[in-house]
Image (spheres, coloured by chain):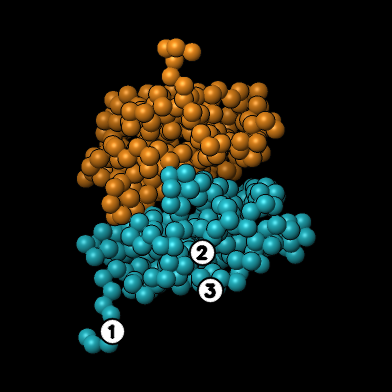
Chain colours: A cyan, B orange
């Protein structure tokens, strides 16, 4: 059809949540959002748990990237990795071996230390997840304590760096923003207790890419 | 001193645990274990929580890689990433963009789906961790249910593949082996319920690199 670019790559997603915007923000930072066709999956009605979608991703999670050879890639960071290798500029996952390792260290520290606890809290409290996971108050309690502890640590870490992994914006900042979207923002409150985290948040909130979290 | 190679790269670690062997297994698969000097950190006596070690890694976790320019890299997979880029052969994290994404997807699925729950169970049950974390029975209960569920899913996934990410051995197999070391082995029991997982376990257990888990 004339006037419309045909995209061979598809990303199956839902608009909100914490994970689909991580990938969209990554693509916007790279300036390649339009190279991908986005396909909505109706998570609210459980379409991601039906056989047709499970043929794409047996885990039923979103987002999922479909390559033009029919390969499916799940997991946000794995999808980002694909685009980092195929569209290296601007780099968001480091260039040299050392920088790649440092960015990966920071992305993991944020994911395993803060994002996972915020994600646990959301899944164990929101009504939306009541029929999808076994909700447990203890997991929420442990998650809140751990997330607060992580914010204290991270605030001290951000004293001398503009961004999470150093002086440039990387995937680790997108992951931290996603954690904030999931609830870490309520933990830092007015920011009085966490001045460096609050400064980081105010700084990155200006970026167009992060407006995908809504 | 004659007769001894001076290594500029150091890895701070303790011999056991689940994470230091992940890195050692990776280096053995690459055939580069001897390019690194290993430095023992006395975790049992809390040396990793003292200021001298925290100057290397403020999180106090192990292993930590020290590069010859004084950069410190924590997080096992980030350390592996450094060696994957500097010593590409044999590849353990994929070569093409697609393969890198697929291996990353699988490594994350195992880490976030199984390894983390096994790790939670260990930290919330072992006496060793009593004075190090807030142990909570509910976390153990949720972890056991989730780990069992993941093993069922993974068993079906392994029906048509020799290794976790496809027909070649990758970092995702090392991560799964680490999860087994942490307790998933007890979940699969005799293997009758999980024949494909049991076949995978029996196959990879032959590898010299995985004898690092002990």
- Comparing labels 2 and 1, the label whose residue is closer to the camera: 1
Which numbered disc, 3 or 1, marks the residue that appears first in the sequence?
Answer: 1
Residue drawn at x 56%, y 52% is: A165
Q: Residues within 10 Å of mark 3 (few under 14, many from 20)?
A: few
Farthest residue to the top: give it: B2
Which numbered disc, 2 or 1, marks the residue that appears first in the sequence?
Answer: 1
To which residue does mark 3 refer?
A208
Question: Residue B65 in the image: x percent, y percent?
Answer: 51, 34
Question: Residue B155 in the image: x percent, y percent?
Answer: 31, 43
A45 sits left or right of B128 in the view: left
Q: Residues within 10 Å of mark 1 (few under 14, many from 20)?
A: few
Residue drawn at x 32%, y 40% is: B88
Q: Are marks 2 and 3 on the same chain?
A: yes
To which residue does mark 1 refer?
A4
To which residue does mark 2 refer?
A18
Farthest residue to the front: give it: B2
């Amino acid at each position: 059809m004339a006037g419309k670019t045909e995209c061979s790559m598809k990303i199956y997603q839902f608009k909100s949540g914490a994970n689909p915007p991580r990938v969209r923000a990554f693509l916007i930072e790279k300036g390649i959002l339009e190279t991908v066709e986005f396909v909505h999956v109706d998570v609210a009605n459980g379409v991601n748990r039906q056989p047709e979608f499970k043929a794409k991703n047996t885990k039923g999670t979103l987002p999922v990237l479909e390559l033009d050879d029919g390969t499916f890639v799940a997991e946000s960071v794995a999808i980002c990795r694909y685009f980092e290798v195929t569209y290296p500029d601007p780099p968001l996952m480091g260039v040299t071996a050392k920088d790649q390792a440092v960015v990966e260290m920071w992305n993991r520290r944020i994911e395993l230390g803060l994002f996972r606890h915020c994600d646990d809290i959301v899944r164990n409290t929101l009504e939306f997840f009541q029929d999808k996971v076994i909700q447990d108050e203890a997991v929420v309690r442990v998650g809140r304590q751990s997330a607060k502890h992580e914010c204290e640590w991270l605030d001290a870490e951000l004293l001398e760096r503009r961004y999470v992994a150093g002086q440039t914006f990387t995937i680790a900042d997108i992951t931290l923003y996603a954690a904030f979207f999931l609830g870490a923002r309520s933990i830092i409150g007015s920011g009085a207790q966490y001045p460096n985290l609050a400064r980081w948040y105010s700084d990155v909130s200006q970026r167009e890419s992060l407006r995908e979290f809504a």
